[in-house]
């Protein structure tokens, strides 16, 4: 009986060892599985001067793309090397990171009309090293205005650099309108306008009732978004086409619900003080009644 017991114990220990080794190997296999990092680089230029890049990193988890935070990506202009290094960026909680083209690369930037931005992500325990690139052609936008009687027009011209000269960029979709807090309010009936063979588009301003500042200025804007060849471009121009801004200081001296506390309406003050007096009056009355009851009880005892 003793031999049988020892034999069963030995078999059990052997099986337990096999199960542990299997689980350990499975865990190692799970830890070594890495997700695919999906990254892209977007090119932005504002006012034909300020150039910056926006990096977006994400990965697919449970059939849905999720932003990747703390992903380090090295950016280069045209080729990989110290002389072409733009910046090292780290993505935030939204999976985005921004880098401005440094002045040290001005000579390399001016040397060509077409450029390629390269991004190399650093490998870590979750992702392997990933390389991404995007190419653009140098472009500029000019915004001008004209008046024809009562009609006011916005003229936008898009030009691309080729063979050392600027040529019209046709069939470019862009937004043309007035810059507001929520974005760009279209100047006309359409949301998107397309340049013609001369690289220009003319939009009649139909939003002529918008208020401007004290000098009647409004901010016109033309914007190209996510163009495969030119990237993202934005130019703005201030013009005195808005309605005059009228500041009525006397309005704030009136007793209304939306003015300061010192200008509270009389009826509201009366209501508030009546409630306060009623509540405190009731409490004081109850206290006096309790005192009277206590005195009467003391006399009877």
Image: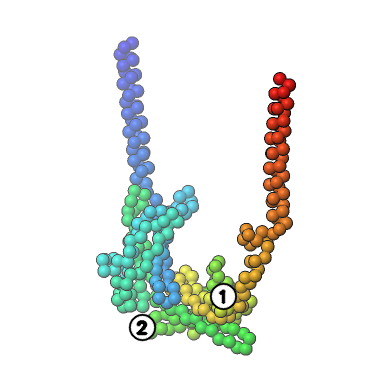
Q: Between marks 1 and 2, how big is the CA–CA gap?
A: 43 Å
Residue that mark 1 sits on: 213
Q: Nearer the viewer, mark 1 or mark 2?
A: 1
Helix, strand or loop status at disc 2 = loop
Q: Residue at x 38, y 81 (%)?
A: 162
Q: Quadrant of the N terminus?
A: top left
Disc number placed over residue 163 in the picture, else none: 2
In this view, 30 is above or below 301: below
In this view, 156 is above or below 7: below
Q: Residue furthest front?
A: 299
Q: Residue at x 38, y 70 (%)?
A: 135
First in sequence, mark 1 or 2: give its number: 2
Q: In terms of depth relative to the viewer, which is nearer, 297 or 178?
A: 297
Q: In terms of depth relative to the viewer, which is nearer, 14 or 20?
A: 20
- Position of 254 compared to 198: left or right? right
Image coords of residue 277 (percent x, y):
70, 46
Image coords of residue 222 (percent x, y):
51, 76
Q: Quadrant of residue 298?
A: top right
Q: Quadrant of the C terminus?
A: top right
Q: In terms of depth relative to the viewer, which is nearer, 217 or 255?
A: 255
Image coords of residue 82 (percent x, y):
26, 66
Would residue 201 be visible to someone looking at this image? no
Q: In terms of depth relative to the viewer, which is nearer, 255 or 301?
A: 301
Q: Quadrant of residue 10?
A: top left
Q: Residue at x 44, y 81 (%)?
A: 159
Q: Residue at x 62, y 70 (%)?
A: 249
- Position of 96 compared to 286: left or right? left
- Position of 7 compared to 249: left or right? left
């Amino acid at each position: 009986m003793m031999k049988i017991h020892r034999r069963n114990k030995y078999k059990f220990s052997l099986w337990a060892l096999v199960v542990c080794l299997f689980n350990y190997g499975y865990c190692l296999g799970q830890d070594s599985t890495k997700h695919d990092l999906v990254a892209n680089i977007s090119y932005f230029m504002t006012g034909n001067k300020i150039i910056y890049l926006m990096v977006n990193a994400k990965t697919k988890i449970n059939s849905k793309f999720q932003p990747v935070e703390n992903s380090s990506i090295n950016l280069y202009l045209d080729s990989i090397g110290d002389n072409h290094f733009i910046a090292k960026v780290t993505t935030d909680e939204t999976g985005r990171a921004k880098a401005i083209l440094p002045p040290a690369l001005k000579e390399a930037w001016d040397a060509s009309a077409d450029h390629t931005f390269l991004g190399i992500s650093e490998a870590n325990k979750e992702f392997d090293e990933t390389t991404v690139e995007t190419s653009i052609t140098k472009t500029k936008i000019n915004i001008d205005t004209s008046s024809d009687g009562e009609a006011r027009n916005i003229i936008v011209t898009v030009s691309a650099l080729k063979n050392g000269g600027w040529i019209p960029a046709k069939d470019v979709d862009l937004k043309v309108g007035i810059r507001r807090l929520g974005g760009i309010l279209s100047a006309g009936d359409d949301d998107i306008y397309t340049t013609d063979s001369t690289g220009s588009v003319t939009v009649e301003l139909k939003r002529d009732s918008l208020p401007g500042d004290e000098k009647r200025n409004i901010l016109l804007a033309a914007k190209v978004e996510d163009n495969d060849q030119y990237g993202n471009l934005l130019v703005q121009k201030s013009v005195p086409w808005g309605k005059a801004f009228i500041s009525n200081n006397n309005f704030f001296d009136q007793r209304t619900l939306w003015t300061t506390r010192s200008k509270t309406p009389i009826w509201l003050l009366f209501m508030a003080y009546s409630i306060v007096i009623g509540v405190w009056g009731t409490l004081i009355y109850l206290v006096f009644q309790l005192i009277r009851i206590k005195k009467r009880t003391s006399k009877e005892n």
